[in-house]
């Protein structure tokens, strides 16, 4: 697989500096209702996961499998045959990951969460958790996604050799190198209504404990085409669930006045599709899996539904270590991936924000599926900032993903 | 620890051990004997008294009583009381006809055992017991009798006879000797008292009314109980019991003084909540089963919060704001939680912290919003719906029966409901259409004409209480007629309802029946009619109504047996 280091402008570093500036200066919170003649609709994000799309061209040579496959390959890389590798893995909880001769097999471990429970030493012959220093292990050279189609957005306005074509809209020049990294892992090798396994669980867990992520749209008439202002904010309260486990539509959320998670974009609605002008994006999370979500050169394409909800893709150049951090917290058991392989591939396919010193790209083009349902936004005094419009979908959020049509 | 128990005396003490398995077995053997002794003590309070009625404590009354006597820190972990039967519109009236099954008695015994164990824990016993034995392993007759006498006064709501004290003390002594611990022995006696009919039932006794020869009235202890459970939904306070003991409660001034003092207590809200939970048929929550598949916003939390919303709103309107009862039907002020607000589709100011209690936020529905008064709340709308569909008939029937004290006869046994239930019928898209067709059957028309128009005005709310404007794509028509006057929707309907004197006369009659646990007799009805006429002009205010009833000597009069139905 060719390794490309596209030399995008070094916007990540500008973005970081810019974000710090926000924190230090603490600019006054901008009210969402800018003028009396504007209609403002509120939403709460009910689902987030990487935008997965597969067809028969995605992994023509096969997929990377899941955790047992990772372990077997990892043991085989030390010179064991497949049967012996399977034997070592099968009995790892009994003999601590030793071969028939009693030799400790260092790589017979699952990295990340749960690693310390395998083997008779914490890290089977390692003095450290290799997930924290992945470059200490060899690149397993996992399969990467190929083909013509993938979800995402055209982040650079260009159509290049690494670009995809959007499978639904036919848009070309889609930038989503993250998908090349993830698309051939079985957990990600899915189409809706199936959601990448670990992200489904991660969001399902986070959403009950994390202050909600909010979106608002302001414009003269949101039922018509025209310019709008789009905001993303963090709430002070968590979402509610309905009897299905869906995120309840029509709930009230207090908008966090801390500017750190406030994002504002110029956008437009055309034919019930919402898009924005590119900009920086940062929103703080509050779970062990999502400390934050950040992009630069952020774009989105959301379809506005008749029931008042929206869904589509949000993407941009994401610091690739953010995603590696997420997966390493999840661990290989829950993540169902090879952390070492992911590390090398994220580094390899990163396509933006070169480090001024090393030239290594720090960000990777990526796209996330977003679903948002109607919600009221209020300020900390209780004044209404955004209306909840529409009943929302019957099914939303992680618990009912199997019902989602797409 | 706030409790009605006062320390008595103090003796020496030793530590013991607990043997509850043995204790429970012992209690099972001893209880029938205790019950027969307690029942035989019916003339305990007054040798001339006559046992009139047994009214079983509700689960709330049981809990309130335990907390008042022994302190809020005592946990009542369970609910042994069954809901009971509704009669004359009230569970309270049906309560006088409830007996106790062996299974329920066992449940009460388990509950009592847990409570007794908590009461006599080392950390509490010194406060609640007031005396200590010379040796924990041995019986202490004097200390046991002191405790039994003091606790018995509050549990039985009257002084115990010597024979009763002796009986429970003997039980304590027997258990102490068997189990080798004074406190466990005392637990046995305490449990024995708590499974006695004298505790589980309000046993009202009458004495001759000397001011009205030939008539009878409740004795002083029964008067104290009736007043206390009526106003506070709990057992009489020490002050009230003292007024009963001294006899001042039987005088007009003494009674008025007690009523006045009780009306200033925060416990008056407990009494209000208990009454409206009964009148508004909250027992239906026990079997409420709104289909989550059709109404996913109606979660269990929402159900619990809806119940609290209604009671909180009533308490706020009638006790805090001191509004007229009629105002409950078009009030726009209420209290919401985040989940209720989402179901109602309105924004509320919110800042719910993780792990915090559910916040209740005052909320006022804007003018023009159809969500007015009690009839627009989730409680009423869901309690009187089918699991999978709203029901104009059930809602209309509820208004007639629970709010207007009218009786709708049950449907004849051979009625064909298939069209009414056929919600997918393309020829009858709305339930209004289907009910109109149903009413074309003259057998059905008589009752449905009374019920359906009221319920159809509420059709803009589905079975879970969520607002809607159409059914099967057809616009919902909420218009109708009440007492010959047209209305366009629920806002108009409640105004007509407020103007109907039946609404307030029903309340006053229900409150009176709730207090006496029976329907009023003819002379009482006369007093109620007079009171209603006055209050309708002056304002039907809760405190005033409760005071008038509580101060009315007839409230404590025992009707002749020919006037009563047992």
Image (cartoon, coloured by chain):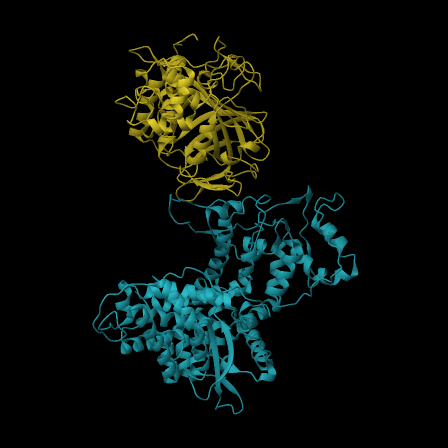
Which residue corresponds to the image point at 43% horizontal and 25% vertical from the top-left? A336
Letter of the chain shown yellow in the rendering: A
Residue B353 to residue B95: above or below: above
Horizontal and vertical percent for residue B194?
A: 41, 70
Residue A343, position in %: x, y?
37, 18
The one of B162 and A155 positioned closer to us in this rendering: B162
Residue B260 position (above or below residue B365): below
Residue at the left extreme?
A: B12
- Between B554 and B88, the one nearer to me in the picture: B88
Q: In the shown orientation, is residue B272 left or right of residue B118?
A: right
Residue B223 appears in the picture as rendered: no
Q: Nearer the viewer, residue B366 or B162?
A: B162
Position above or below: B257 against B492: below
Q: Quadrant of residue B456?
A: bottom right
Q: Quadrant of residue B296?
A: top right
Count of numbered circles on the image: 0
Q: Position of residue B183 (x, y in %)?
A: 30, 68
Q: Which chain appears cyan? A: B
Quarter holding the C terminus of chain B is bottom right
Residue occupying the point 79% across, 56% down: B440
Q: Foreground: A394 or A30?
A: A394
Residue A404: percent from the left, percent from the top?
A: 56, 31
Quadrant location of the N terminus of chain B in the rendered image: bottom left
Q: Quadrant of residue B330?
A: bottom right
- Residue B177 visible in image: yes
């Amino acid at each position: 697989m060719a390794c490309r280091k596209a030399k995008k402008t070094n916007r990540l570093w500008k973005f970081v500096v810019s974000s710090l500036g926000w924190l230090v200066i603490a600019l006054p919170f901008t009210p969402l209702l800018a003028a009396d003649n504007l209609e403002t609709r509120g939403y709460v994000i009910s689902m987030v996961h990487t935008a997965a799309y597969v067809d028969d061209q995605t992994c023509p040579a096969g997929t990377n499998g899941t955790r047992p496959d990772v372990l077997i390959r990892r043991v085989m890389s030390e010179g064991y045959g497949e049967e012996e590798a399977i034997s070592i893995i099968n009995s790892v909880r009994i003999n601590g990951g030793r071969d028939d001769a009693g030799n400790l097999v260092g790589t017979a471990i699952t990295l990340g969460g749960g690693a310390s429970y395998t083997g008779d030493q914490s890290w089977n012959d390692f003095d450290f958790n290799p997930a924290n220093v992945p470059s200490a292990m060899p690149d397993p050279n996992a399969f990467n996604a190929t083909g013509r189609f993938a979800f995402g957005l055209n982040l650079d306005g260009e159509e290049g050799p690494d670009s995809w074509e959007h499978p639904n809209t036919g848009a070309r020049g889609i930038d989503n190198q993250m998908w090349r990294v993830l698309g051939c892992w079985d957990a990600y090798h899915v189409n809706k209504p199936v959601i990448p396994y670990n992200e489904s669980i991660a969001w399902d867990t986070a959403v009950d404990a994390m202050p909600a992520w909010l979106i608002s749209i302001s414009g003269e008439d949101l039922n018509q085409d025209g310019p709008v202002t789009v905001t993303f904010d963090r709430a002070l309260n968590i979402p509610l669930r309905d009897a299905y486990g869906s995120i309840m539509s029509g709930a009230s959320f207090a908008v966090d006045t801390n500017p750190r998670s406030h994002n504002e974009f110029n956008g437009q609605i055309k034919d019930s599709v919402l898009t924005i002008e590119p900009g920086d994006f940062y929103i703080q999370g509050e779970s062990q899996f999502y400390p934050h979500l950040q992009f630069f050169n952020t774009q989105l394409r959301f379809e506005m539904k008749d029931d008042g909800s929206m869904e589509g893709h949000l993407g941009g150049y994401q610091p690739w270590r953010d995603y590696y951090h997420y997966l390493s917290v999840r661990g290989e058991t829950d993540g169902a991936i090879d952390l070492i392989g992911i590390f090398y591939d994220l580094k390899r396919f990163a396509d933006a924000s070169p480090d001024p010193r090393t030239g290594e790209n720090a960000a990777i083009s990526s796209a996330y599926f977003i679903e948002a349902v109607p919600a009221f936004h209020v300020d900390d005094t209780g004044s209404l900032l955004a209306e909840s419009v529409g009943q929302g979908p019957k099914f939303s959020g992680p618990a009912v993903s199997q019902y989602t049509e797409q | 620890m706030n409790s009605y128990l006062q320390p008595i005396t103090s003796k020496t003490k030793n530590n013991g051990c607990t043997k509850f398995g043995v204790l429970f077995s012992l209690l099972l053997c001893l209880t029938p004997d205790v019950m027969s002794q307690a029942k035989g003590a019916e003339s305990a309070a007054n040798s001339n008294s006559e046992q009139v009625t047994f009214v079983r404590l509700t689960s709330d009354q049981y809990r309130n009583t335990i907390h008042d006597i022994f302190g809020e820190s005592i946990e009542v972990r369970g609910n042994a009381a069954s809901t009971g039967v509704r009669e004359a519109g009230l569970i309270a009236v049906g309560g006088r006809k409830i007996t106790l099954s062996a299974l329920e008695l066992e449940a009460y015994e388990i509950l009592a055992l847990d409570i007794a164990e908590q009461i006599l824990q080392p950390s509490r016993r010194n406060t609640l017991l007031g005396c200590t034995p010379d040796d924990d392993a041995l019986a202490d007759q004097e200390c046991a009798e002191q405790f039994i006498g003091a606790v018995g006064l509050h549990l039985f709501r009257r002084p115990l006879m010597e024979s009763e004290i002796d009986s429970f003390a003997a039980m304590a002594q027997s258990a102490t000797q068997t189990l080798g611990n004074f406190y466990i022995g005392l637990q046995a006696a305490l449990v024995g008292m708590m499974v006695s009919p004298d505790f589980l039932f309000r046993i009202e006794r009458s004495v001759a009314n000397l001011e009205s020869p030939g008539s009878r009235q409740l004795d002083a202890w029964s008067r104290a109980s009736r007043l206390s459970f009526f106003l506070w939904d709990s057992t009489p306070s020490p002050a009230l019991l003292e007024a009963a003991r001294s006899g001042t409660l039987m005088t007009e001034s003494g009674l008025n003084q007690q009523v006045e003092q009780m009306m200033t207590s925060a416990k008056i809200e407990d009494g209000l909540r208990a009454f409206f939970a009964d009148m508004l048929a909250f027992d239906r929550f026990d079997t409420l089963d709104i289909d989550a598949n059709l109404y996913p916003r109606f979660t269990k939390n929402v159900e619990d919060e809806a119940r609290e919303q209604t009671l909180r709103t009533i308490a706020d309107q009638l006790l805090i704001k001191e509004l007229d009862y009629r105002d409950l039907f078009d009030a726009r002020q209420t209290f919401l939680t985040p989940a209720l607000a989402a179901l109602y589709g309105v924004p509320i100011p919110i800042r719910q912290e993780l792990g915090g209690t559910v916040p209740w936020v005052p909320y006022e529905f804007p003018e023009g919003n159809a969500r007015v008064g009690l009839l627009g709340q989730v409680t009423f709308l869901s309690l009187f719906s089918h699991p999978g569909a709203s029901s104009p008939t059930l809602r209309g029937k509820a208004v007639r029966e629970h709010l207007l004290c009218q009786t709708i006869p049950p449907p004849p046994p051979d009625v064909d409901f298939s069209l009414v239930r056929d919600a997918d019928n393309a020829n009858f898209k709305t339930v209004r259409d289907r009910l109109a067709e149903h009413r074309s059957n003259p057998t059905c028309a008589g009752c449905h004409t009374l019920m359906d128009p009221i319920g159809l005005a509420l059709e803009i709310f589905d079975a879970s209480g969520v607002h809607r404007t159409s059914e099967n794509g057809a616009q919902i028509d909420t218009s109708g007629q009440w007492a010959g006057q047209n209305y366009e929707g629920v806002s108009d309907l409640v105004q007509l309802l407020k103007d109907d004197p039946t609404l307030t006369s029903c309340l006053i009659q229900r409150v009176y029946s709730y207090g006496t646990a029976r329907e009023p007799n003819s002379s009482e009805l006369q007093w109620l009619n007079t009171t209603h006429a006055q209050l309708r002009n002056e304002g039907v205010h809760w405190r005033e109504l409760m005071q008038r009833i509580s101060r009315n000597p007839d409230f404590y009069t025992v009707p002749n047996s020919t006037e009563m139905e047992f």
